[in-house]
Image: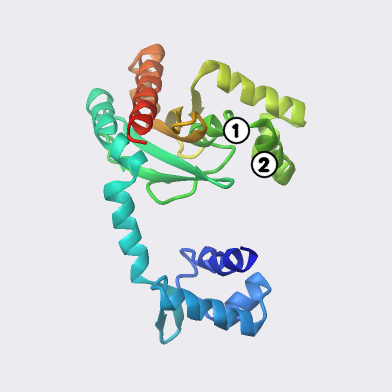
Amino acid sequence: MNSLRRMLDILDLFKPDQPVIDVDAVCTQLGYTSASAYRYIRELSDVGLLVRLPRGYTLGPRIIELDRQMSEYDPLLASSKGIADDLVAQTGLDVLVSELYGSTVINVLQKVGADTDPLNFGRGRPMALFRSATSRVILAYLLPRQLRRIYDANASQPDLQRLGGTWKDFSKAMLQVRKQGFCVSVGELDPGKTGMAAPIFDEKQRILGSITLVGPNQRFEAFNPSFLSGLVTGAARQITTSIAAND
C-alpha cells in the first residue's frame, strides 16, 4: 500500500506552473531514489496515467477517460446536476458541488449563473480549507478525531488562526456551523462575492461534500437570507436522499 501511495503521489507534482515532469523532478521534490522514480513512472505510463514527451512526462489520456466516466456516472454528480440547474434558474447564482477526499476539498461540478465574472475556484480546483464556506461546512461535520488531525496539521496557518487560535476555539467555531446547518463566507476567495454552502452526506450519513451558492454580494443581498439558506440546505438534502436511494 505504501508503494502504491508513493507512486500515486507523483501525480500531485503536476501543477499549472509544472505541466511536465521528469525523473529529476520526482527525485528532488519527493525524495525518491532514481530507481524508484523510473519504476513508478514506467508503471503509471503503462496504464495510461502518464505519457512521455520530449521534455519529460505529462498526464496521460487515461485521465480524460476517467474524467468522462465520473462526469457521466458518478452518483454525486448524477444526483446533483438537475438540482444545481434548478438553483441557478431560481437565483442566477453560480452553483458548486464539491467533494472531500483525505484532507482536500475539490469542486467536481460548476453550474454558471448570471454573473459573467468567472470564479477563481471553479471545477477541478481544490478549495482553501479554512477560507471558504464550501470547505468549512464539510469540516464542521467531520468526526472529532478527523477534525483534530486537520487542526494539528494546520495549526500555524493564518486562515485557521482566524477561526480560532486554540483547538477549543476552532472546534467551537465548527460546532456553530454544524448547529446552523449551513455556512456563509463573504469575499474570502473572490473579492465582492459571497458563498453559502450546505453539507451533503453519503448513504451512511457520513459527510461526503457540499453544495454552494456563489455570486456577487449585491445579488445575494437582493434575496432574503433565510430564502437562500432554505434553498441550499433543501438542495443538499435532496442530493443526500438521492445518493442513498441509488446505493
Residue 141 position, x and y percent, is: 57, 29
Viewer can see residue 136: yes
| 36 relative to 180 in the view: left or right | right
Residue 238, numbered label: none
Q: Which residue is at the far left?
A: 89
Q: Dots 1 and 2: beta carbons under 8 Å?
A: yes
Q: Would you identify the image quadrant in which residue 150 lies?
A: top right
Residue type at tag 1 = Leu
SS state under label 1: loop
Residue 150, numbered label: 2
Q: Which residue is at the far bottom?
A: 54
- Relative height, residue 2 to residue 57 (above, below): above
Residue type at tag 2 = Ile
Viewer-proximal residue among 77 and 151 = 77
Q: Earlier in the sequence, mark 1 or mark 2?
A: 1
SS state under label 2: helix
Viewer-proximal residue among 187 and 12 = 12
Q: Residues within 10 Å of mark 1 (few under 14, many from 20)?
A: some
For image coordinates 53% across by 63% down, the residue present is: 12
Measure the alpha-carbon separation of dots 1 and 2.
10 Å
Viewer-proximal residue among 107 and 101 = 101
- Relative height, residue 12 to residue 199 (above, below): below
Viewer can see residue 117: no
For image coordinates 36% across by 33% down, the residue present is: 243
Residue assigned mark 1: 142
Residue 63 position, x and y percent, is: 37, 64
For image coordinates 37% across by 36% down, the residue present is: 247
For image coordinates 57% across by 66% down, the residue present is: 4
Viewer-proximal residue among 168 and 158 = 168
Q: Would you identify the image quadrant in which residue 226 lies?
A: top left
